[in-house]
Image: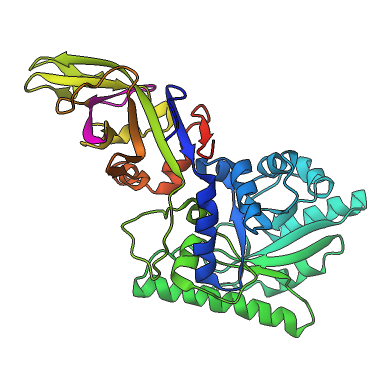
Amino acid sequence: MLESYSRCWAEIDYDAIGHNVKEIKKLVGETKIMGIVKANAYGHGSVKCAKALEENGVDFFGVSSVDEALELRNAGIESSILILGYTPPEHFHYLHEKKITQSLISLDYAKRLNAYAKEHDVIIHAHCKVDTGMNRTGIQDQDQKKEMDSIIEVFSLTKISVDGMFTHFPVSDDLGEESAAFTKHQIELFNEVVASLKEIGIQPGILHVQNSYGILNYGDLGMDYCRPGLLYMGVTSDDSIPILSQPNFIPVMSLYANVSVVKTIKAGQTVGYGRHFMATKPTKIATISIGYADGLPRLLSNKNHEVLIHGKRCPLVGNICMDQCMVDVTEIEDVKEGDICCLVGRQGDEVVTIDSISRDAHTINNETLSAIAARVPRLDKRG
């Protein structure tokens, strides 16, 4: 662990990303990796994660917006970048200026992009999104509605180079019979679109369908790329969800904060907003310099959620504040100002996980990690 840096900070082991990439490759065979670095790489630092991924052979990145794509380009990332979401028309110029690939999220959107490209006499590179059941973005190809003519029309647009095609799985994390059947049918539907295009002489280009749980539960589907997000950070969305593989991932993020004040209160005294914690005996309280504005969910309040100080477990007490929280350290000797509290990671022989925060906050690790605020410094554990 690095020395105390700020009131609170995260440490990222970017070297561990290489290990996690190797574990992913064991699951998907020859399928290449498109590293998803949207939302600041789920809170881990998009540029540093992208560079670590490039060092380990990843040559394609997925982001949610043109702003995220430009951040990578401005940092010197030259690998291919796919915008998975919507780019407003006023930002279309970045797509050809910065060599960014755009998802075609509907036929109308593709036509609008093509009209822009005609007007400016440029070629826009794109991937066609096929909606096989997520019903979020993409051109539908489902049993209830098939828009194959629209997919073909997208590939015929004269100023758009459709270099690939993809879909997305909504329930690849669920091994139940119904959900597994749904995901397998999505794969069938996608493969049918691929076959139909090839039958009429259209090459669909780069194919990718697997998100993180698609990788964990469906292995090598013979596609060109897969799209891991949390997996290369060494975590899944929910540790309690069973999976069909046994990867040996290493979580890359740890989270720490300083003890700022230690005081002893008497029986009957309360702690924090709302006075939800009342001491039943003399109790030693340590105030920790991290709060919900830093990304520690307020939903952890009054749930006996544990953190580590001096390598020992101690519970949060009272409501979590915007910038601070309080911990019962009655059973821990010599706690003092400046001591380090571990909220995620290892201290001594004990470990606390990001998943424990997510479970107590009734959410998934994707949200918990992405919510760690920008004001929390991300330190490279490599020094």
Q: Position of residue 138 (x, y in %)?
A: 63, 61
Q: Position of residue 12 (x, y in %)?
A: 49, 41
Q: Which residue shows up at 57% across the image and 60% down it?
A: 227
In this rendering, the answer to whether 159 lies above or below 217 is above
Q: Quadrant of the N terminus?
A: top left
Answer with left or right where residue 29 lies relative to residue 107: left
In the image, 152 versus 56, the foreground residue is: 56
Q: Is residue 176 a member of the stretch shown in magenta? A: no
Q: Is residue 318 a member of the stretch shown in magenta? A: yes
Q: Is residue 188 visible?
A: yes
Q: In the image as oriented, which residue stretches furthest toward the right?
A: 121
Q: Which residue shows up at 61% across the image and 78% down it?
A: 191
Q: Quadrant of the C terminus?
A: top right
Q: Position of residue 372 (x, y in %)?
A: 46, 35
Write down the region rendered in magenta.
311-327
Q: Which residue shows up at 84% across the image and 45% down it?
A: 97
Q: Position of residue 212 (x, y in %)?
A: 49, 60
